[in-house]
Amino acid sequence: MRCLLVSDVHGNLAAFDAVLRDAGQFDVIWCLGDMVGYGPDPNECVARLREYPHVCLAGNHDWAVLGKLDIHTFNSDARAANQWTQSVVTAAVQAYLQSLMPQRVEQGYTLVHGSPRQPIWEYILDPLTAELNFPLITTRVCLVGHTHVPVCFYMPEDNDDHLCEPRSPRYDQPISLTSGRWIINPGSVGQPRDGNPRAAYAILDPEAATLEHRRADYPIEVTQQKMREAKLPRRLIERLAIGH
């Protein structure tokens, strides 16, 4: 089985379409949340996802658009983007987002937007936060999003100190997940924040337990122009070009 693993598409259709083309053949999409927010194409991104067999989680921006989170807890740019998204999403997209859960288990893999400890809001950015979450994971591998940064946290077998190792992605090189335990973030499709503006995603074979991080070029200027036309915050537009 070949699974396309994506997260944080954030209404960026040009980036999402580039990933779909770059990924080649796959059987299912697993999306780790935040299909909307920030970007100019929330309805179109959800519609594109629904063209494929898929599993999708709820993210914090999805909940903010639904009014399930206080929008004033977001920074001013994110708040403005979410308010704009609220004004344009269709009733069908609202109903779809309302149906999503922030955490689930699929084929022996834990899927969560933020973290097992706080599925919607916690960022796993460092080994300590990862270590605190490992005891809550009942599967060998946990797949997370939310941070927009591709990374792996590896916990070796029989690790009495409960210390995990952060590992940077090795692009286009499958890694084996058959030993130890893992928390893995594929990065963001629609708004990368690791200094690389290319759309980030991963290919997972759940049965063989292999995962391959990947990046895809996309026409950033197309998304930026749509954002200008929607009068979305300037900082959100500019950051796409630098991946930060």
Image (cartoon, helix red, strand yellow):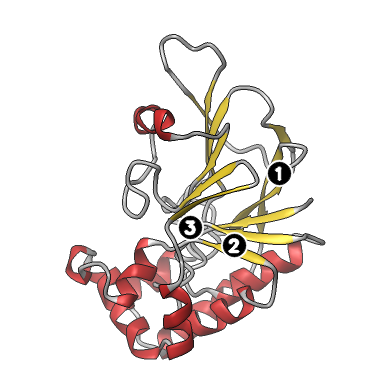
Q: Earlier in the sequence, mark 3 or mark 2?
A: 2
Residue farthest along the left direction in this orientation: 72
Quadrant of the image containing the C terminus: bottom left
Pointers 1 and 3 in contact (C-beta within 8 Å): no
Cα distance in 3D space between marks 3 and 2? 26 Å
Q: Is residue 219 visible?
A: no
Using residue 150 as the reference point, say whether residue 228 is left or right of it: left
148 lies above or below 128: below
- The answer to which of 222 and 159 lies nearer the viewer is 159
Q: Amino acid at mark 3?
A: Gly
Residue of label 1: 206
Viewer-nearest residue: 96 or 90:
96
Dot label at residue 55 = 2
Residue 69 in the image: x percent, y percent?
25, 67
Identify whether 58 is placed above or below 112: below
Q: CA distance from mark 2 to mark 1?
A: 14 Å
Badge 1 amino acid: Pro
First in sequence: mark 2 or mark 1?
A: 2
Callout 3 crowding tier (Cα within 10 Å): few <14, some 14–19, many ≥20: some
Q: Residue 243 got which mark? A: 3
Q: Secondary structure at mark 3?
A: loop
Residue type indicated by callout 2 = Val
> How many dots with numbers?
3
Q: Residue at x 36, y 67 (%)?
A: 61
Q: Residue at x 58, y 31 (%)?
A: 140
Determine the residue positioned at 77% across, 37% down. 208
- Dot 1 or dot 3, earlier in sequence: 1
